Image: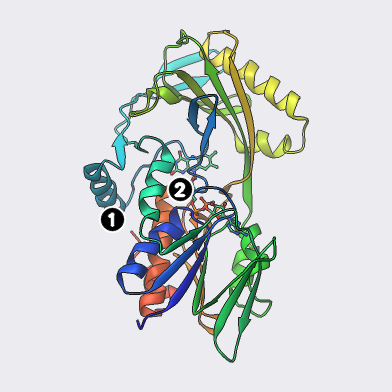
Amino acid sequence: MTHKNIAIIGAGVAGLTALEPLVSAGNTVTVFDKSRGSGGRLATKKLNDSSWDMGAQFMRAHSAEFTAQLKEWQALGWVEHWDVTPWAINGTQRTASPDDIDRYVGMPRMTGLSRKLLEHADEFVTQARIAETQFDSDTQQWLLTTEEGASFGPFDEVIINTPPEQALPLVPEDSPVREQIKGVHMLPCWTLLLGFDHPLDCVFDAAFVKSGPISWIARNNSKPGRDARETWVIQANHEWSERMVDAPRDQVQQDLLEAFHTACGDHSKAADVWLHRWLYSLPADAPLLGALRDDKHNLTVCGDWCHKPSVEGAWLSGRYAAQHLAAKAPASDLQQTTE
Ligand SMILES: Cc1cc2nc3c(=O)[nH]c(=O)nc-3n(C[C@H](O)[C@H](O)[C@H](O)COP(=O)(O)OP(=O)(O)OC[C@H]3O[C@@H](n4cnc5c(N)ncnc54)[C@H](O)[C@@H]3O)c2cc1C
């Protein structure tokens, strides 16, 4: 591939995975994100000197490639093994549910990993929500405009790494990838973060909950590298979150708090409480397509929703995106190398 000026819209795992091979191949890459930092759904919430993994809770590998990548990141100190035995909670039944899954977390928080991946970028433009994209078919180049009206470019290639709802307005009307983007539905997830001034009397550090509004509970400070302060993450299940998506925040918070107290068995009052609504938490189903490619517009689209709903899925999608640019190979060929 000859030198290209490339824009990546969205500093999630997928976009940041595409970054390194593109820079190593001699391209100039600018990354844009609407947030103040990188990581997307590897989000960290900071509040009153405490921090929580507010999005992805841990990474696990199904493929040999991601297994090797996690080991490499571990050797670099970017991720660490989280030695946890999850419990299973169903109604009043609570049982330890050991498994042989290796769970890894970013160090010292999930966004610690994205920060490392981002170091390859020639430029990272933060608080830049790209609102408009213009492709000039004569010059074969792109101009990008933020919602504040700042313009960037020209770029020879654009990679979009945003959830599908946010990708669609950025894709030309005559692009063949629009139909694939339209077909994906993202599920919401209400997430409650709690901070306590003392350790809770709770038998587990993490639990999968099978009844009521909650699906996952974790003692955030049981993960390696985290501050010692007692912090908990409570995630509602997708069905409940979808039903309650527009419910008053007070009610959502109250319901999740009550369910947490019941599951955990300790009714201490939290010193810090933070409620977050993820509108686009995970794709309802993902099409295992790797990444989407539109050669006519020098456009590539990647993200977990193009491939598999997980950090691993996003990572694989980012790798396919970089391969598209390197080889311009059709997605069907690349698909054969999937796992
Ligand atoms: C609550 C929750 C729990 C999860 N738990 C796990 C877990 O335990 N294990 C696991 O493997 N996965 C988990 N996931 C899923 C995992 O976080 C995602 O699969 C993965 O991080 C997605 O990465 P991505 O690169 O596809 O997209 P994202 O991380 O969504 O990145 C997209 C980026 O695009 C930016 N953006 C959007 N629109 C624009 C725009 N117009 N201009 C500029 N920037 C824009 C966003 O700010 C964001 O940074 C969880 C997700 C959530 C929300």
Which residue carries the number 2 mark? 310
**Marked residue nearer the N-terminal end (1 or 2):** 1
Residue sticking out furthest to the left: 75
Q: In which quarter of the image is residue 193?
A: top right
In depth, the one of 246 and 26 nearer the eye is 26
Q: In this view, does 157 lie above or below 183?
A: below
Question: Quadrant location of the C terminus?
Answer: bottom left
- In the rendered image, the vertical position of residue 229 relative to residue 142, given as above or below: above
Near-viewer residue (285 or 69): 69
Instruction: Name the residue located 36 percent from the left edge and 79 percent from the top edge.
Output: 327
- Identify the residue at image location x=74%, y=24%: 250
Relative image position of residue 125 (x, y in whole percent): 52, 59
Secondary structure beneath disc 2?
Answer: loop
Quarter holding the N terminus is bottom left
**Could you tell me the amino acid type at mark 2?**
Ser
Identify the residue at horizontal 61%, vertical 65% (top origin).
181
Q: Does any atom of ligand 1 lie closer than 8 Å to the CB of label 2?
A: yes
Question: Which type of secondary structure does the marked residue at label 1 adopt?
Answer: helix
